[in-house]
Image: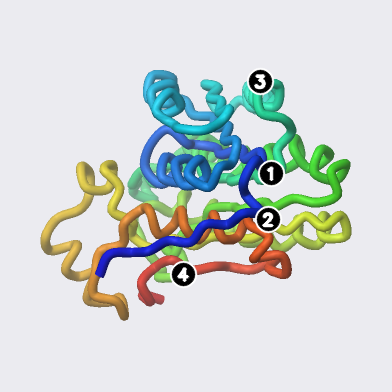
Amino acid sequence: MSPNFATYPSLSGRSVFVSGGASGIGAEIVKAFAAQGAKVGFVDIDQQGGEALCASLEGGPHAFAACDLRDIDSLRRAFAQLAEKIGPAQVLVNNAARDDRHDWRDVTPEYWDERQATNLRHMFFAIQTVAPGMIAAGGGAIINMGSNSWWEAGGGFPAYTTAKAAVHGLTRSMARDLGKHRIRVNTVVPGWIMTERQKELWVTPEALAKQVDRQCLPDPIEPVYVARMVVFLASDDAGMCSANNFMVEGGSI
């Protein structure tokens, strides 16, 4: 059955910032917001991919800025560039992360810190950067990307699962701190999403069959479904949704 997705008039003309928007789930999010008529600005370490995606988007204006999110000063400069082109963020999507596998016996303090910088730290500082503008505007929406990996007690990447578990604490705390300003903060929790990266590195027929078997729904999960949840949470239709987890995992938990 082909999907028939919704259009949210409240997103038309809204300024949306997305981290890690050049590929995978992030690219689907960027395209989904552009299709809603939003003004989309996104950052990514992949300059070539980001520029190509930005050039392909219809409507606009849209903007891309290359940056390494592990460098918070670089993140702040990139967000300032986006704001100059499309205005202050009314929606922030903290999407960027890397789920590189690693053996717990091989983890060094340096690697641990780098993984937290890649998967968690930038989320807080992105919120800190855009929240004053949202407060001045009278509200906004922030969506943080979680993961069902730690809900399922997944092994093989403890630094990643620790960071993703912490995202839920960040969401809950910031929802409380920012709620009085009518800023909503939520977590989207994807399952095993069939991005090109996943297919290239880890998807095998056996692994996919095992995953689908543990889901209630019998189909592999495409990135577009994560993007659709993000778009909903950014819209006025989700105006009373905050401090919560929204699962897109096919019923696998």
Identified at 33% across, 47% down, the residue is: 101
Q: Classify 10 Å Cα crowding around label 3: few (below 14), some (14-19), many (20 and above).
A: some
* Residue where numbered disc 3 is placed: 81
* Mark nearer the N terminus (2 vs 4): 4
Spatial distance from mark 1 to mark 2, Cα to Cα? 7 Å
* Residue where numbered disc 2 is placed: 170
Q: x, y (%) of residue 195?
A: 30, 47
The one nearer the camera, 83 or 111, is: 83
The disc placed on residue 177 is: none
User: Looking at the image, which residue sits at the far left?
Assistant: 205
* Mark nearer the N terminus (4 vs 3): 3
User: Of discs 3 and 2, which sits in the foreground?
Assistant: 3
Identified at 48% across, 40% down, the residue is: 30
The quadrant of the image that shows the C terminus is bottom left
The disc placed on residue 124 is: 1
Kindly identify the amino acid type of the residue bearing the numbered disc 4: Trp
Spatial distance from mark 3 to mark 2, Cα to Cα? 26 Å
* Mark nearer the N terminus (1 vs 4): 1
State left or right for residue 39 relative to residue 134: left
Q: Do the numbered discs 3 and 2 sit on residues whose CB atoms are within 8 Å?
A: no
User: Of discs 4 and 3, which sits in the foreground?
Assistant: 3
Q: Do the numbered discs 1 and 2 sit on residues whose CB atoms are within 8 Å?
A: yes
* Residue where numbered disc 4 is placed: 151
Q: Classify 10 Å Cα crowding around label 1: few (below 14), some (14-19), many (20 and above).
A: some
Spatial distance from mark 4 to mark 3, Cα to Cα? 37 Å
Q: Do the numbered discs 2 and 4 sit on residues whose CB atoms are within 8 Å?
A: no
Kindly identify the amino acid type of the residue bearing the numbered disc 3: Gln
Look at the numbered disc 4 and give the secondary structure of its residue.
loop
